Amino acid sequence: MAEPRVSSIDGKLAEEFACPCHVEEVKEKMAAFAKSHASAGRRVVLITSGGTKVPLESRTVRFLDNFSSGRRGASSAEYFLDSGYAVIFLHRHRSLYPYTRMFSSVNMLDVLQFTGEDTSSGCQVVVNQQLLPNIAKVLKRYREVKDGQLLLPIEFSTLSEYLHLLKAAAQALSTIGSKAMFYLAAAVSDFYIPASEMPEHKIQSSNGPLQLSMKMVPKILSPLVKDWAPQAFVISFKLETDASILLDKARRALDTYRHQAVVANVLDSRRGHVVVVTCESQAELTLTEEDVKNNVEIEERIVSNLTSAHSQFVTQHLG
Ligand code: 9Z3
């Protein structure tokens, strides 16, 4: 039997990025989740969501971070679940989470109140539904998803954790072939300080102004598409602040990695406009004023576009 290909990124991952100790256990969990849902006829999507933390010291006091709230990943997870997918939600610790995201700005203690008398087990507390008008509907859906074990949440904080867990996820999902989708919406740092070059202790301000030299993070999309999950349907996201270079960069990413689509967005307009770029098409998805008034979210359109494309992809691969 041929030896499995070891990409240079595997070596780099092992040498320069500390591996979270529970990665093997998480990989088994993800593989079992994928297998059971695929045998029940469901497709499985791995969503990455939120930003990554890049430590500057190994006993970390300071780190670099980015803007991502995790809203895109969390709301997309809900639309994938509504479309019949099982979801592995690989998200940044404390970033927005499916269903609870809708109440993230609410102070819980402001929406709870006491009712009637104390009971033997303590006070009765209920939620004031006037202050949380959608809570019953959202709770019902959350319970259905939880009881059906349709959502597997996995957390990361640092760039290292993200890279190792994504590799583990890709290998775990490779067993279900084209039924797996990767929806890589996390905002991942492009730069890092290798473990071997990182000071152990807190950087001292008494040493004067700080100059950092950072290395390029290896492009994980390349081994994911080529080696780890070569039959999967893979979607990356491209973010720019300069709209004039966005589509060119999205096409270049498709040319380089040869995956199925890039969702291109600009920082300031990302909630209302994206372009889904594939090698043969370019679909502009835009919310109208009417959509915004009706609380339509752009993620509903993105997910609808990609689930249809995934159906075609699965048919071609099985046919
Ligand atoms: C995205 O472009 C996502 O749409 C956002 C969503 C991070 C903008 P929020 O979490 O925002 O809802 O606040 N994600 C990917 C961004 C990224 O870092 N892409 C890399 C790049 O553009 C390549 S994979 O070079």
Image (cartoon, rainbow, N blue to C red):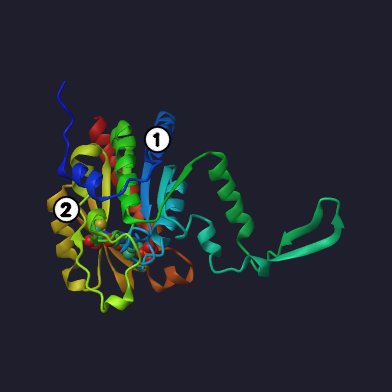
Quarter that holds the N terminus: top left
Q: Amino acid at mark 1?
A: Ala
Residue 222: where, in percent of width, then height? 18, 47
Residue 256: where, in percent of width, then height? 13, 52
Residue 283: where, in percent of width, then height? 25, 59
Tell me whether circle 1 and circle 2 mark residues in contact (CB < 8 Å): no
Mark 1 or 2 closer to N-term? 1
Query: Of residues 197 and 295, which is closer to you in this image?
Result: 197
- Determine which quarter of the picture holds residue 312: top left
- Determine which quarter of the picture holds residue 229: top left
Q: Amino acid at mark 2?
A: Leu
Is disc 1 placed on a helix, strand or loop? helix
Query: Of residues 291 and 265, which is closer to you in this image?
Result: 265
Residue 28 visible to the viewer: yes
Residue drawn at 31 percent across, 52 percent down: 160
Which residue in the structure is indicated by mark 1?
Answer: 34
Relative horizontal placement of residue 245, taking residue 27 as reference (left or right): left
Is the residue at mark 1 in contact range of ligand 1, meaning its CB lies under 8 Å from it? no
Q: Is disc 1 surrounded by few (<14), some (14 to 19) or many (20+) residues within 10 Å?
A: many
Residue 204: where, in percent of width, then height? 32, 72
Residue 254, numbered label: 2
Residue that lies at the very extreme toward the top in this rendered image: 1
Report how far apart the C-alphas of labels 1 and 2 lie in the structure.
Answer: 26 Å
Mark closer to the observer (1, 2): 1
- Ligand 1 shows up in the quarter that is bottom left
Residue 276 visible to the viewer: no
Is disc 2 placed on a helix, strand or loop? helix
Q: Is residue 229 above or below residue 250?
A: above
Q: Is disc 2 surrounded by few (<14), some (14 to 19) or many (20+) residues within 10 Å?
A: some
Residue that lies at the very extreme toward the front in this rendered image: 206
Residue drawn at 23 percent across, 56 percent down: 194
